Image: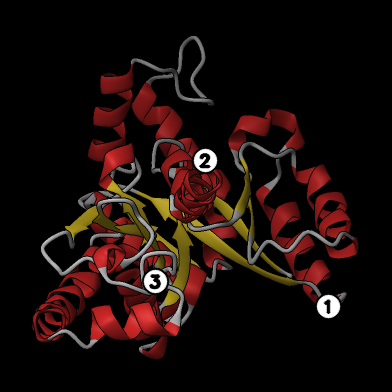
Amino acid sequence: MRFLLVTGLSGAGKTSVNRYLEDMGAFCVDNLPPNMMFKMMEAFEQSTVGYPLVAMAVDVRSAELFDAKAVSDLIEETRELGYNIESLFLEASDDALVSRYKETRRDHPLAREGISLTAAITRERSIMQPLRETANYIIDTTALKTRELKQHLGGIFSGENQAAGMRIEVSSFGFKRGLPRQADLVYDVRFLPNPFYIKGLGSHTGLDADVKAFVLENPVTVEFLKKLEDLLFFLLPHYQEEGKRSLSIAVGCTGGAHRSVAIAEHISALLKSKGWQVSVTHRDLALEQALWKSSAEA
């Protein structure tokens, strides 16, 4: 199992980093007391939970429980025991940190009566230096946009496997039961000939070979899929560049059992062949089949 210590200056973005990592599938803990680090790592190593990354945010908020040199030494000790742990250090300029604290109106963890915000920031830099010197990754968030921060984290989280970093869900549905609320992209394929009205095909679905052939071999479908393929392979890298970690593509026909199912299966297979992480679901297929059965029995 892979572990990541998230640390750095207060106000530099640790909370945002944890949120983004969690969206990527990591298990994240914020403001973990340093003396709990090893126990937590040990518990995850012994568990069957399959998180690709466990991130632990540790910093001066732990007050007297925090010692940067001791945390740095602990990281080295856990590595010697065989644990796969890296550290990420977040920092920003004094002006940026002061501005952020003024915007949020929160107190700096080291600020107390008689100590100004700038003095607290200076003191924290000194305290955190041992962790900065030993960090695997250092990110300065002073002028970093959200997209750029997500890109940095994507590189840490996914390594070089960026093409597989975004999860894609392809689903079919029937317009008569409404649009899927989670969909990012919706394609209406009701313009294609409907197999439901073709003798011998009506009671079959888009998962059956005869319906697939009827839908996919139609010249209009062939042209549509070619244009759709060009559009998807143009869009996907740009969505990923923006930091999107999951994308929902919904394909709809009238009932959600014939055309949309065949097209969704085709898109899913196409994306998988290009190395994307893809799942496919058919929202209304079972409902349509139950409706056919009840109509036949009536």
Q: Earlier in the sequence, mark 1 or mark 2?
A: 1
Disc 1, disc 3: CB below 8 Å? Answer: no
Q: Which residue is mark 2?
A: 298
Q: Which residue is mark 3?
A: 206
Residue drawn at x 26%, y 21% is 103
| Amino acid type for the residue under numbered disc 3 | Gly
Q: Earlier in the sequence, mark 3 or mark 2?
A: 3
List the single residue furthest toward the top. Answer: 113
Q: Which residue is mark 1?
A: 82
Q: How many marks?
A: 3
For label 3, count other residues whose C-alpha is less than 10 Å away and answer few (under 14), some (14-19) or many (20+). Answer: many
- Can residue 246 be seen here? no
The image quarter in which residue 43 lies: bottom right
Q: Earlier in the sequence, mark 1 or mark 3?
A: 1
Q: Relative to residue 109, is residue 14 depicted above or below?
A: below
**What's the distance in space between the residues labelled 3 and 2, CA to CA?**
25 Å
Mark 3 or 2: in front is 2
Apparent side of residue 47 relative to residue 176 in the rendered image (left or right) = right
Residue 231 pos. (x, y %): 12, 74
For label 1, count other residues whose C-alpha is less than 10 Å away and answer few (under 14), some (14-19) or many (20+). Answer: few
Label 1 sits on a secondary structure element that is: loop
Residue drawn at x 59%, y 58% is 131
**What's the distance in space between the residues labelled 1 and 3, CA to CA?**
50 Å
For label 2, count other residues whose C-alpha is less than 10 Å away and answer few (under 14), some (14-19) or many (20+). Answer: few
Which residue is at the front of the view, 54 or 246?
246
Q: Of the numbered discs in the image, which one, if any, rests on residue 30? A: none
**What's the distance in space between the residues labelled 1 and 2, CA to CA?**
66 Å
- Quadrant containing the N terminus in the rendered view: bottom right
Label 2 sits on a secondary structure element that is: loop
Q: Relative to residue 111, is residue 92 depicted above or below?
A: below
Which residue is at the front of the view, 185 or 35?
185
